[in-house]
Amino acid sequence: VTIFNLDDILGESGASSLQALPVLPQAPPWLTHVGQAYRFKVVESADITRTIAFHYLEREAPKGYEQTLVIYYLAQDGLSGGLNDATEWQRLPTYLDTDENLAAAHMPRNQAHGQGIYALMATLEMPAVQPGWNLLGYPIPQARPVSNALASLAGAYTAVYQHDATVAPEWRLYDPAIISEHPLYAHVINDLETLAPNQVYWLHATATITPYLSVDVGNVMAGSLAAEADALPPATLFGPFDSANVITPTVGMTLTAYVQDVACGQGELYLLENQWVYKIQVTAAVQKNGCGVLGDTVQLVADGFNMAESIMWDNRRAQFQPITLTNTPATSHTDQAPTGPNADNSDNPPP
């Protein structure tokens, strides 16, 4: 690695030490360290415009991902016993010349005078997602648990769906809040466990943010994104089910969701730790005409009886909603219920 003084190209860099690190401090899981990392310290009051240049070996870069190399910086002012040290790595605008195996970046002119740790990292930068629903491709040739694959988006998304019309249920969900808020239901609600190579997913983001994916150690696999995501995700409802002694519940008993007169999904009952619970997915209007849009009222029916609760259709995350059966017979509906969970054969594209 080389440090240049841009104020005086022949002058001193103002460094008091440049130390190669045998161990890199904890880095986010979406960053893959390449080569050697360095801790940089300056002489007192050395306020200089500098660049840092890494010369790396081609074999050190993850095969197929050399073009993703970027310099990252972790600020450390060397004072206060580390109390003022940063905890988050900062991505630096990087000049990359893969022919010369060279990566260079301006060193920050901050309160720490650019002191800290510099490392060359590989990570795959994806197009930024916007608040609301986004289609997110997963081009990494290695399946990973959803929370691990999307670690760079932690706290900035509420739901991830995969759509596959060839299976039932055709929508699989991962809701990151379920594990902590409703752990009893986690294995029932979060049936999307991994992101798979060359698939596309619906992701509901809460902020504009750029996803970064951890690169694979092997070659980039050829292939295009799958075309399963041909409809907007459903609303997923779950929670305790109280039969109120109107019926005798059984495992697998069917619930049907109606939006006005249209059957928009079927779910079922589960017995979890001696408690009756349910899960149902309610189809979006773009997938079946007359079904849910944000704010629509959903009526649930079991064994010919209505639930006491009316629920608002909302697909931005899984909804925890306890329900209680009434002895009021359900209204006769002209639309037939789907034949399976969230069943529908529509190929309508998203709006």
Image (cartoon, helix red, strand yellow):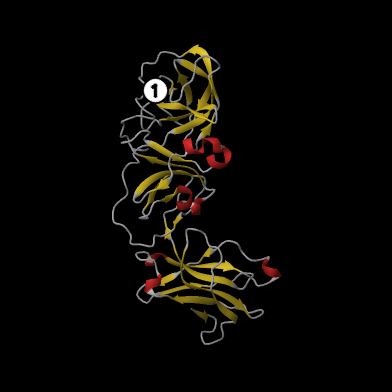
Q: Residue at x 55, y 38 (%)?
A: 183
Can residue 233 be seen from the camera position used here?
yes
Q: Residue at x 38, y 67 (%)?
A: 66
Instruction: Name the outermost residue toward the front.
Output: 274
For the residue pair 296 and 171, the one nearer the viewer reads as 171
Q: Is residue 11 above or below residue 54?
A: below
Where residue 193 appears, as percent x and y from the top left, is: 43, 44
Where residue 72 appears, as percent x and y from the top left, is: 51, 67
Q: Is residue 98 left or right of residue 39?
A: left
Q: Is residue 138 left or right of residue 237?
A: left
Instruction: Name the outermost residue toward the bottom.
Output: 10
Can residue 97 be seen from the camera position used here?
no
Q: Which residue is mark 1?
A: 263
Where residue 132 appears, as percent x and y from the top left, is: 47, 42
Say which element carries label 1.
Answer: strand
Q: Residue at x 56, y 17 (%)?
A: 244
Q: Quadrant of the C terminus?
A: top left
Where residue 118 appears, as percent x and y from the top left, is: 53, 71
